[in-house]
Image (cartoon, helix red, strand yellow):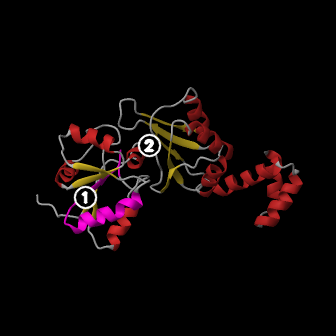
Amino acid sequence: MSQRKFDFYIVPTPIGNIQDITLRAIETIKEVDFIACEDTRVTQKLLNHYDIKTKCVSYHKYNERERVDFFLRELRAGKRIALVSDAGTPMICDPGAVIVEELIKEGFSVTALPGACAVTTFLSQIPRSSEEFAFIGFMPRSEKQIIEVVQKHAGVNTVFYDSPERILKTLETIKSVRPGAKIALARELSKLFEEVVYDDISSVTAHFQNGIKGEIVCMVYACENPENTDLEHKIKILKAKGFKDKEVAVILSALFDLNKNEIYKKSIDM
């Protein structure tokens, strides 16, 4: 079947299993004039596996701006370009937004091929009662920022990436705000040691108490009463500062127009 020709192609690559690439993706990266990639060494392994000889040009978050003029010049000369990331779909926590914005401004045709993505691969194999979810990319590093994210998205299933070095600390911080939270955690998706765990956050943390390896995708399930999660966190902060239960109730009721007696009762119970 003949395919429409575009100037710029966004091409997903395997997230782990090298066979998880579409025939169209292989055909595209064979036919373009060159491939823009995060790490030429990583992409070259994929090209070697499929005997693809297309030239690679580095394009990563540290040289995005510098590469824009080069890409525009090549496209104006009639060249066609494919953008890939080291694994998965470009622009999903990977570079690409800068050049795509410029290409659209300049009137070049851009298309994205369907293919491998850790988020959709993960979501398609865990139990969910709702299609709604928030994807936040990589979880912030600081405890304060993590807490802010958890509170902000308490009412919706929240999906994020994290590194194996940080994930257990991240889960402990989430647990301080949502001690009874349900989570799903996957590591090494599509690879030999793929593992997906679904349980309450304490059980998942205990499961990986000896450490965890591989790329991480995690989801914190929505809280049934997100307002309570935020209120409990505020109470904890004030009590940690030395305020008594009655003082906590007065302060929070005045600041947020809440029922003072209900806050007082909740503060006593905590």
Please provide percent x and percent y for residue 85: 35, 49
Where residue 191 appears, x then y in whole percent?
36, 34
Mark 1 lies on a secondary structure that is strand
Residue 227, visible in the rendered structure? yes
The quadrant in which residue 261 appears is bottom right
Q: Earlier in the sequence, mark 2 or mark 1?
A: 1
Q: Residue furthest left?
A: 1
Q: Secondary structure at mark 2?
A: loop
**Residue 225, image x and y in percent?**
64, 54
Of residues 225 and 144, the one drawn nearer to the viewer in this rendering: 144
The span from disc 2 to disc 1 (Cα, nearest Å) is: 36 Å
In which quadrant of the rendered image does the C terminus lie? top right
Query: Where, by quadrant of the figure, is residue 262 drawn?
Result: bottom right
**x 67%, y 47%: residue:** 177
**Residue 80 left/right relative to 84:** left
Residue type indicated by callout 2: Ile
Query: For the point 32% across and 68% down, which residue is it?
Result: 103
Tag 2–tag 1 contact (CB < 8 Å): no
Badge 1 amino acid: Ile
Which sits in the foreground, 254 or 69? 69
Say above or below: 224 vs 70.
above
In front of the other: label 2 or label 1?
A: 1
Q: Which residue is mark 1?
A: 81
Q: Which residues are magenta?
A: 64-89
- Which disc number belongs to residue 126? 2
Residue at 59% x, 30% y: name it.
Answer: 206
Residue 162 on the magenta span: no
Residue 96: image location, x then y, percent: 38, 58
